[in-house]
């Protein structure tokens, strides 16, 4: 058992001391990524009778956007 623990400790030391995947404390390093974060603000509704989908994209989702979307729904569905 002691020999096994020694091998595990040696492996941990090797990983910690290797240059692969570890950045030394105090060193700044840029990490390349292929994905960026972009935000899409959508408001949507489904007409359960016809299964029609209604969506609108807005710069921000706020009270004004909500009112605009409700007006859009009213005009699209002919709600009374």
Image (spheres, rainbow, N blue to C red):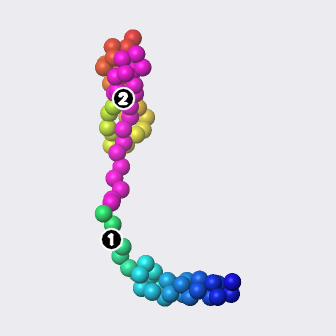
User: 71 or 43, which lies in front?
Assistant: 43
| Residue 10 locus on image (x, y percent) | 56, 88
Q: In this view, does 15 lie to the left or right of 7?
A: left
Q: In which quarter of the image is residue 61?
A: top left
Residue 29: image x %, image y %? 38, 79
Q: Name the residue under label 2.
A: 69
Image point 34% across, 45% down: which residue? 40
Is label 2 in a helix, a strand or a loop?
helix
Disc 1 to disc 2: CB gap under 8 Å: no
Residue 45 lies in the magenta-colored region = yes
User: Which range of residues does the magenta coloring cover?
Assistant: 35-54
* Nearest the eye: 16 or 59: 16
| Label 1: which secondary element | loop
The question of residue 56 being in magenta is answered with no
Using the image, determine if residue 73 lies above or below residue 65. Answer: above
Please name the residue that numbered disc 1 is placed on: 32
Position of the C terminus by quadrant: top left
Q: From what the image shows, is residue 68 above or below residue 38? A: above
Residue 43 seen in this snapshot: yes
Image location (x, y in percent) of residue 66: 41, 32
- Cα–Cα gap, marks 1 and 2: 39 Å
Of labels 1 and 2, the one closer to you: 1
Q: Is residue 40 above or below residue 10?
A: above
Q: Quadrant of the N terminus?
A: bottom right
Crowd band around label 2 with a 10 angstrom C-alpha radius: few (<14), some (14–19), many (20+) = many
- In the image, 57: left or right of 8? left
Q: Position of residue 6 (x, y in %)?
A: 62, 88
């Amino acid at each position: 058992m002691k020999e096994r623990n020694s091998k595990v400790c040696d492996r941990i030391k090797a990983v910690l001391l290797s240059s692969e995947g570890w950045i030394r404390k105090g060193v700044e390093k840029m990490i390349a990524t292929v994905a960026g974060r972009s935000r899409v603000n959508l408001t949507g509704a489904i007409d359960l009778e016809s299964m029609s989908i209604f969506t609108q994209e807005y710069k921000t989702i706020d009270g004004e956007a909500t009112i605009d979307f409700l007006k859009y729904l009213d005009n699209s569905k002919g709600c009374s």
